[in-house]
């Protein structure tokens, strides 16, 4: 099984969130691999309020469409326009350049450590 | 991620797919490779170099006997008698009401020997129907699907790759093999039926071999193709390749609610076929198909090219595009849709009412509640140069 960055926390829906202020959210390599080549991203709007566990967007790959869940509650302050323009970044660098959006966090859902997430996906 | 269904059959190449790290998916009752690395990379490899496909899920049904051609003429909509030895035709098996039970490729291997290749999910039904329909003729229907593996090499480099694997004595026959023709050859040391057919819109070969020799051929093809840019390619790439090439997929463009005419494939129905002595041949579905051929279909298959970025998917509604871009009344249904790697925009096939089927008609597809602009374009989306 792949190594997951220890500094991040993970949702069972395969999103990750860092501990920054604002916090950065993306999808994991497990999600990216399962989706196949990502071709379209629908991300929440800047300024919108999102809730942990709620659907906030869509990730569309060559073969399928998946809902994007937020791992945290808060206000969206930035979306990754580079990833919207070039969705393949989600496949090539899901924990880096393929991040999705940033949130001023007011609360989180149930999140897993890297080790717990590895066990969950293993 | 993967739930293994014990009911799903595994092809003779299953271990090869696992060793290559393929993502697997259920298809037509089989556990098949969906992709090995990337759908897009596999798609592009086939367009630019070559791809290697495991198609062992397909059904291979042989008809052997003095009345093989006559029996087939009665059973399918095409004209088997007219197929020359060594040649092949695209055809269909229809029900009495003219609906499509499966689309097929029919190879004439010898004067009294035909091979019918059926879709995976339909193969048992096709074998049953052929057996039933051929019962009163002097012919043996033999379903050899389980004993047969099918490996395809598709793409502009396919000829070089297959030729490099072929015994010297057979190389010329393989290189000069015409589209929709077949020949027997020794490939990678394996007795192979080599057919110049495919489902990708590229030049390519389909190699029928005994199931127990499939892995040998597969590994030899991967090794021989390495320097030519060949990669193993999964069902995901196969689907986007055939969609670009405007080829129907049973269960999407064709099914038991469709006759060949709606699908724009009326040309495969030989209403006026006659036997060697000139008498008209009655075949299953002929009366219904004749009536259908004389009337305007309620819906027709069209190509749609997306003007935005969001692909339409099978099952989505096609709607009238209002002047402000919003969705109007429903006029059809998408049967297949995907982002086209070659064209760089979404493409789809859809059944629509004849009034909105003209080339250039501006329509929209309801993509999960939003009207995405699409325009009617001729099929296929892609033709090799």
Image (tube, rainbow, N blue to C red):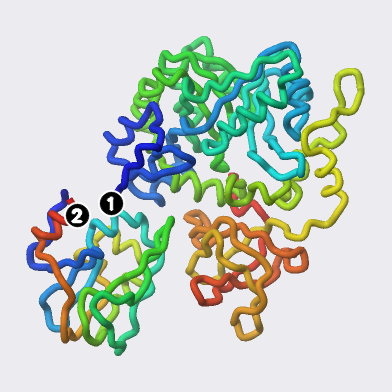
x and y percent of residue B369 in the render?
51, 76
Circle 2 sits in a helix, a strand or a loop, which is it?
Answer: helix
Left or right of A46, for residue B26: right
Camera sees residue B110: no
Q: Subunit of mark 2?
A: A
Q: Which chain is indicated by disc 1?
A: B
Q: CA distance from mark 1 to mark 2?
A: 8 Å
Residue in the picture at 10% in, 60% down: A116
Q: Which mark is residue B65?
A: none
- Residue at left 33%, top 75%? A55
Pointer 1 residue: B1
Q: Secondary structure at mark 1?
A: loop
Q: Is residue A67 left or right of residue B268?
A: left
Task: Between residue B140 and residue B382, name the one nearer to us.
Answer: B140
List the residue tagged with mark 2. A121
Q: Is residue A18 left or right of residue B341?
A: left
User: In this rendering, is residue B188 above or below A57?
Assistant: above
Q: Is residue B57 left or right of residue B3?
A: right
Residue at 84 percent across and 37 percent down: it is: B271
Image location of residue B245, percent across then percent down: 59, 48
Q: Quadrant of the C terminus of chain B?
A: top right
Residue B193: percent from the left, percent from the top?
54, 19
Circle 1: is it few (<14), some (14-19), or many (20+) Cα within 10 Å? Answer: few
**Residue A47 in which image quadrant:** bottom left
Residue B135 placement (x, y as % from top left): 71, 20
Number of numbered discs on residues: 2
B373 over B237 or under it: above or below: below
Q: Which of the 4 quarters of the picture holds residue A82?
A: bottom left
Same chain for the residues at labels 1 and 2, yes or no? no
Q: Residue at x 70, y 67 (%)?
A: B360
Q: Residues at badges 1 and 2 in contact (C-beta under 8 Å)?
A: yes
Q: Give the camera-side residue of B226 and B66.
A: B66
């Amino acid at each position: 099984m792949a190594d997951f960055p220890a500094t991040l926390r993970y949702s069972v829906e395969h999103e990750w969130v860092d501990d920054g202020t604002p916090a950065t959210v993306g999808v994991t390599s497990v999600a990216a691999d399962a989706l196949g080549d990502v071709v379209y991203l629908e991300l929440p709007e800047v300024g919108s309020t999102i809730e942990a566990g709620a659907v906030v967007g869509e990730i569309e790959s060559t073969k399928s469409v998946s809902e994007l869940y937020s791992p945290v509650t808060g206000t969206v302050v930035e979306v990754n326009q580079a990833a919207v323009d070039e969705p393949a970044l989600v496949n090539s660098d899901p924990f880096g350049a393929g991040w999705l959006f940033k949130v001023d966090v007011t609360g989180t859902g149930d999140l897993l450590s890297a080790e717990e997430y590895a066990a969950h996906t293993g | 991620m993967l739930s293994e269904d014990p009911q799903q059959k595994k092809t003779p190449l299953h271990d090869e797919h696992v060793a290559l790290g393929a993502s697997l998916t259920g298809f037509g009752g089989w556990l098949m490779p969906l992709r090995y690395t990337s759908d897009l990379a596999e798609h592009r490899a086939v367009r630019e170099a070559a791809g290697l496909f495991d198609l062992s899920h397909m059904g291979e049904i042989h008809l052997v006997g003095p009345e093989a051609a006559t029996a087939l003429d009665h059973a399918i909509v095409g004209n088997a008698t007219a197929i020359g030895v060594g040649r092949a035709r695209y055809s269909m098996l229809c029900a009495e009401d003219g609906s499509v039970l499966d689309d097929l490729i029919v190879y004439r291997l010898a004067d009294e020997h035909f091979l019918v290749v059926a879709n995976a999910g339909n193969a048992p039904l096709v074998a049953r129907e052929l057996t039933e329909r051929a019962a009163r003729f002097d012919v043996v229907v033999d379903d050899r699907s389980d004993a047969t593996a099918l490996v395809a090499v598709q793409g502009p480099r396919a000829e070089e790759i297959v030729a490099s694997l072929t015994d010297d004595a057979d190389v010329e026959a393989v290189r000069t093999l015409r589209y929709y023709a077949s020949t027997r050859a020794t490939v990678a040391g394996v007795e192979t039926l080599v057919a110049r057919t495919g489902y990708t819109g590229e030049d390519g070969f389909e190699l029928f071999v005994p199931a127990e020799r499939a892995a040998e051929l597969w590994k030899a093809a991967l090794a021989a193709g390495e320097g030519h840019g060949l990669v193993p390619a999964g069902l995901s790439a196969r689907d986007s390749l055939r969609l670009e090439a405007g080829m129907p997929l049973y269960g999407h463009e064709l099914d038991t609610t469709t006759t060949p005419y709606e699908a724009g494939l009326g040309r495969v129905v030989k209403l006026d076929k006659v036997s060697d002595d000139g008498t008209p041949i009655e075949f299953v579905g002929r009366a219904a198909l004749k009536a259908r051929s004389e009337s305007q279909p309620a819906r027709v298959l069209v190509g749609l090219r997306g003007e935005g970025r969001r692909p339409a998917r099978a099952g989505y509604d096609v709607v009238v595009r209002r002047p402000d871009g919003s969705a109007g009344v429903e006029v059809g249904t998408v049967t297949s849709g995907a982002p086209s790697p070659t064209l760089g925009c979404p493409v789809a096939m859809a059944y629509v009412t004849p009034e909105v089927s003209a080339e250039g008609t501006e329509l929209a597809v309801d993509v999960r509640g939003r009207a995405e602009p699409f325009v009617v374009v001729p099929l296929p989306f892609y033709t090799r140069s």
